[in-house]
Amino acid sequence: MSKNSKFSWVYIVVLTVLLAAGLFYGCGGGGGGGSSPPASTGTAVISAQLVDAKDDTLLTTTTGPKGGFDVRYSVDGTPLKATDTIKDGIISYTTTSLSVGTVVNVEVIPKDAGGNEDHNYLRNNLIVTINQAGANDYTNRKIRITNLGNLPNGVTAATGTTTSDTTGQVLTSLVITTPAGSAGAPTATVSIPAGTVLYDATGQPLTGTLTIRVVYYPSTSADALQSFPGGLNNIVQTNGVIGAFISAGFLSIDIVDSSGRIASGITFSSVPFEIITEIAPSTINPDTGSSVKVGDKIPFWSFDSRKGKWKHEGNKTVETGGSTGLRIRHNPNHLSYWNLDWFPSSTCTAKISFTGNTVPLKVIIKATGGYGFCAVFFQPAGDSNAVIWYVPSGIPFTVEAYADSNLVGSISTNNWCGEPKNTLNLAVTIPNPTNRTVTVKYVCPTNSSATAPAPGIAIRSCKKTGNGYKQCDDVGSTDANGVLNFNVTDTSKVTVAAYQSNLYEAVNNAISLPNTSVCPTTGSGGSGGTGGTGTGSNF
């Protein structure tokens, strides 16, 4: 992988760069005459939807964790601002001016009603970069959050309990194995022997009842590959090198004591803490181009969610064992997300040229033939170009485009890097697009006749559920008059705006947002007579 390669997998329109977990994003190239010396700093405008990894429901305090999400923005672990608490499922932040090349980690932590981390949901991260001088826009993305009560297809989980004493020493051994999910599918096993000592990130011991949750994402499931935290849909940082993974499996291990402390460190007794991860026989080793076999070496990685970086923990040798006949074993000295992944050395900058995309598209990139890669990005309506960085060379891919749930175009290639100009031409056919106009205005909460246009409000077209919204497409922002025209393919979708941590649904294609700044103000009347009073508006 070239050391001078650019950072992100995907970019969008002229000055826009989009990444995400959830979340590749497309880009059109900018043009223009002349040139000027490159500046060394820029800012990033970051916005994203927080959605359920299985069904794309927007995760508010009604549909997701009761305390919402804490969102932390940092550079190499150093905070950029105070933690945001998100209640409406929408994150939005503009960084300070940062040097070009700076990597910004966006860490998303689910919270329960008491303000503690909600371990029924997994954390996720979004990695963005200051890739150019000036403004960098990271928008139109979705960060997929795994809900242990609503697992994505192919993902399996298991829970167990044991106890520890006041020193953090586990008193009773525990073995947890995730279910297979389907016949012949791989599983994962975590063995915690008595005598193991567990402590949190501050060095405090975990005491009392311990709850252990193990979640396994097999490489054979496209939904799992799209969903795993910190993973394929994010740019990967590994020991200072940037690129992407081809996966053989991913594992989350979460240990919490009765006081809410989260295990971070492990001290072994005479018998080590052990992770066993099975591998599907259909998995292709990209180093050999053949199915994984006993004796193959697979790189093993851990994830630092605070910094948004993967760390190489060494190569693991595939051995015989387990239900699939192939497995690796690892004895960790700390806890994190764990990942069996190859880091391809031969990659290219690939492109997609779209025609006919008059509505926003969900685009799925899938490596086929047993290679463990699948990711999603969202292509804006009318944007005809996407650039995808670090596409592995010599691997077959299929690209599918969806308008709502309808497949509207697809294309396959045996070697994307070998296509002319590394480009796939994807023509889409949109079924019966319908034009819709929404008007958004600010309204005084105490005087509904006092209004003003609401420009620059982000609008989403969403499927309405019993208690929330899902499958939300970003369709644009209102103009100076508070108006936006856009196309939809599913006329049952409703139009929604997010404003000041609340969601507002259009009624008769109009949205009213409460804003005290449009309320009338009382001023002094004109001179003459006994004087008087008059009212006026600051708009």
Image (tube, rainbow, N blue to C red):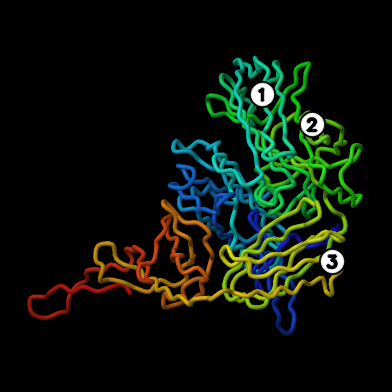
Q: Are marks 3 and 1 in contact (CB under 8 Å)?
A: no
How many marks overall?
A: 3
Badge 1 crowding class, 10 Å Cα cut-off, few under 14, some 14 to 19, many 20 or more, is: many
Q: Which label's residue is closer to the chain start, 3 or 1?
A: 1
- Residue 322, above or below 240: above
Relative to the observer, which residue lies in front, 246 or 244? 246
What separation in Å lies between label 3 and label 2 (alpha carbons)? 37 Å
- Residue 397, above or below 198: below
Q: Are marks 3 and 2 in contact (CB under 8 Å)?
A: no
Badge 2 crowding class, 10 Å Cα cut-off, few under 14, some 14 to 19, many 20 or more, is: some
Q: Which residue is mark 3?
A: 417
Question: Is label 3 or label 2 in front?
Answer: 2
Disc on res. 322? 2
SS label for mark 1: strand
Question: Is label 3 or label 1 in front?
Answer: 3
Relative to the observer, which residue lies in front, 251 or 314? 251
Residue under the image location 70 percent in, 16 percent down = 195
Badge 3 crowding class, 10 Å Cα cut-off, few under 14, some 14 to 19, many 20 or more, is: many
Q: Which label's residue is closer to the chain start, 3 or 2?
A: 2
Question: Is label 2 or label 1 in front?
Answer: 2
SS label for mark 3: helix
> Where does the image place residue 273, in percent across and percent down from the top left?
74, 24
Disc on res. 198? 1
Residue under the image location 75 percent in, 63 percent down = 398
The amino acid pointed to by label 3 is: Cys
Q: Residue furthest left?
A: 530
The quadrant of the image that shows the N terminus is bottom right
Residue under the image location 84 percent in, 74 percent down = 420
